[in-house]
Amino acid sequence: MRADRLLSILLLLQNHGRMTSRELAEKLEVSERTIFRDMEALSAAGIPVYAERGSGGGWALSEGYRTNLTGMKTEEIFSLLLSNPSNLLDDLGIKDDFETAFQKLLAASPTTIRKNAELVRQRILIDGVGWHQSQESFAHLSTVQEAVWEERKLYMQYRKEEEIVERIIHPLGIVAKRNVWYLVAESGGDMRTYRISRLINARMLEETFERPVGFDLERYWEQSTDRFKKNLPRYPARLRINEKLRSRIGQERYAKIMRSLEASEGSGWLELDIEFETLESACEIILSYGPLVEVLAPEELRAKVVSEVKAIASIYGGTLSFPPPLSEA
């Protein structure tokens, strides 16, 4: 719309100083003729915009003129809230800078926008640091979102392992972890997290509820994520690996290197103390590296890897012999 474009021109000139018609046209994806018409409209509206000719010329605002409008719609401000990748900003050391800048933006916004922005922040969270990509479907996401927004109780049927359970919950917020959506809710006086793709049915009820005093969605999610990570299963092992695999194994999602040391000077091999999640996942990861990895301990893992390799060889009609277990060597 033309009104939005005129305001965008004002903000561009205010933030960048002098700009040519071509630069403005490219920024706004219009023709230079349209820019000339827009400048005439701004001037007719009493905006002190003027043109300077010559190689260093262009359009500019009179010195000292500043509009007190941010030019941002309510939806645009909300989009900044939802796209705030707090974990990544924290890694870069600029999370506090983002928060300060956003608070300044809100301070310059009308009271209704400030109020609604806080409502959004306490109900929707985008967590960009995901577990892994997923192709899940979320048939009931819109119903859940509406219940969160309206602060209405939600009836749901939820798939929990092999059974389907029914609950009436107080939906407090939704969180996107990459492209997986979660519902944070109060159920029976406790805070729970539900994977929205596991909802079999969801229906918003007429009855409303009161949000817990002091509840903060982002803080709850960070604490919940920390608890989840601490409770993950751990399967410790010791490996002998070719040194060129060090960085690759360090990037494995389900493996954590605890200690690394050179097997023998100049050998090109390393010994790693490493934590996998389970025996099965450890075996799968180790097999993916072929002869560049050897299991030193535990014997259970070494035996499983040998068994899998023999099974693979039998498919191709081969026979294999292996050195004795380390305990017998």
Image (cartoon, grey):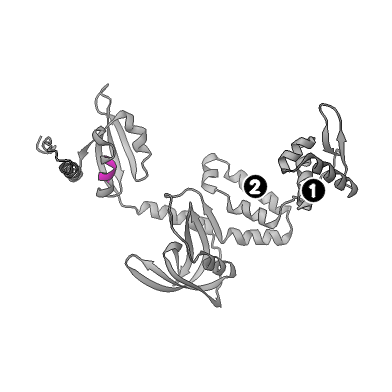
Q: Give the residue displayed 86% in from the left and 48% down from the top.
A: 41
Residue 88 point in image, percent of width and height: 52, 44
Residue 230 point in image, percent of width and height: 37, 52
Q: Dot 1: what SS?
A: helix
Image quadrant in which you'd find residue 74: bottom right
| Mark 1 vs mark 2, CA separation in Å | 28 Å
**Observer-nearest residue: 191 or 39?**
39
Q: Amino acid at mark 1?
A: Leu
Toward the left, the furthest residue is: 328
**Observer-nearest residue: 230 or 296?**
296
Look at the image and tell me in which quarter the C terminus lies.
Answer: top left
Residue 247 point in image, percent of width and height: 37, 33
| Mark sitting earlier along the chain (1/2) | 1
Total residue callouts: 2
Q: Is residue 209 visible?
A: yes
Of badges 1 and 2, the one in the foreground is 1
* Residue, disc 2: 100
Residue 125 point in image, percent of width and height: 54, 56
Is residue 281 a member of the stretch shown in magenta?
A: no
What crowding class fits label 1: few (fewer than 14 Cα within 10 Å), some (14-19), or many (20 or more)?
A: some
Q: Give the residue displayed 77% in from the left and 41% down from the top.
A: 31
Q: Amino acid at mark 2?
A: Thr
Most common secondary structure along the magenta stretch: helix
Q: Is residue 17 visible?
A: no
Q: Which residues are magenta?
A: 282-286
Q: Is residue 171 left or right of residue 22?
A: left
**Observer-nearest residue: 49 or 273?**
49
Q: Give the residue displayed 67% in from the left and 53% down from the top.
A: 76
Residue 6 is labelled as: 1
Q: Is residue 329 left or right of residue 60?
A: left
Q: Contact (CB < 8 A) between labels 1 and 2?
A: no
Q: Is residue 106 left or right of residue 239?
A: right
